[in-house]
Image: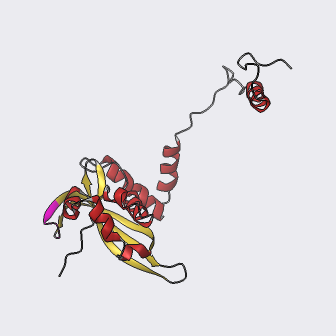
Amino acid sequence: MPLPVDVKHGTEPTLRGRIGRWLRRAAPPAQRADEHRPATPGVGELSRSYWSARSGSRVAELVSAHEAAVTHPGRPRANPAFSEALFVELMRARQYRRAFDQLSDACKRRWGSAEAFAAAQGSGALRFLQGVRVKDVRYLDEWRDAEAGCTYREVAELDVEYTLGSTSASKVVQRVVHLVPDGGKWRSVCHPVSAA
């Protein structure tokens, strides 16, 4: 069998076979000019339509919350539930320096450095963290972080369940957490524990 023009002599037989099979693959059938295909909406449009039709479902609520965040000026475009899950997964993976990058600027200043943040995580309860589930997202026009002594605008307030422990004995802890807009992204609020 003659080699395809693009293949040089001395090429490995398996590579020649792959290239030959690729060149011989069937071309997709051409659409006839008189054939009419209805326009298909994009996947995002189909998904939104499908889930929006299920007004009682939890997914519809999440879609609505996500779209509210996307269209509201002053709020980051990302989904705050995803941002919280990312922060938790970085902490679970002990990627503390990367998790530090997810903090608000005020929190970073209070920690002082990524090294100080990482050093404080080894003995905390987060080492027993198994997972996170964001149950609800609300958007607040304003929220005061009493611990940092500052007020944020356009804040995401999340009802979150954290699973702590081991697979044989786990406990679910419910918390209300806040994510603040900072640099076009949702940032976590996690302060150093104050010495009493």
- Residue shown at the point (29%, 61%) measured from the top left: 115
Q: Main SS of the magenta segment?
A: loop
Would residue 99 be found to the left or right of residue 17 on screen? left
Q: Is residue 145 visible?
A: yes
Q: Is residue 115 above or below residue 47?
A: below
Where residue 178 sits, quadrant-wise, is bottom left
Would residue 116 be found to the left or right of residue 62 on screen? left
Q: Is residue 150 above or below residue 45?
A: below
**Magenta region, residue range:** 147-151
Can you give x and y, in whole percent of width and height, for residue 106 in the image?
19, 59
Q: Residue furthest front?
A: 10
The answer to which of 103 and 71 lies nearer the viewer is: 103
Quarter of the figure that contains the N terminus:
top right
- Residue 181 within the magenta-colored segment of the rendering: no
- Residue shown at the point (45%, 63%) measured from the top left: 93
The answer to which of 171 and 39 lies nearer the viewer is: 171
Can you give x and y, in whole percent of width and height, for residue 181 in the image?
25, 54
- Residue shown at the point (42%, 59%) measured from the top left: 62
The answer to which of 63 and 56 lies nearer the viewer is: 63
The answer to which of 126 and 68 lies nearer the viewer is: 126
Can you give x and y, in whole percent of width and height, for residue 16 in the image?
77, 27
Q: Is residue 157 visible?
A: no
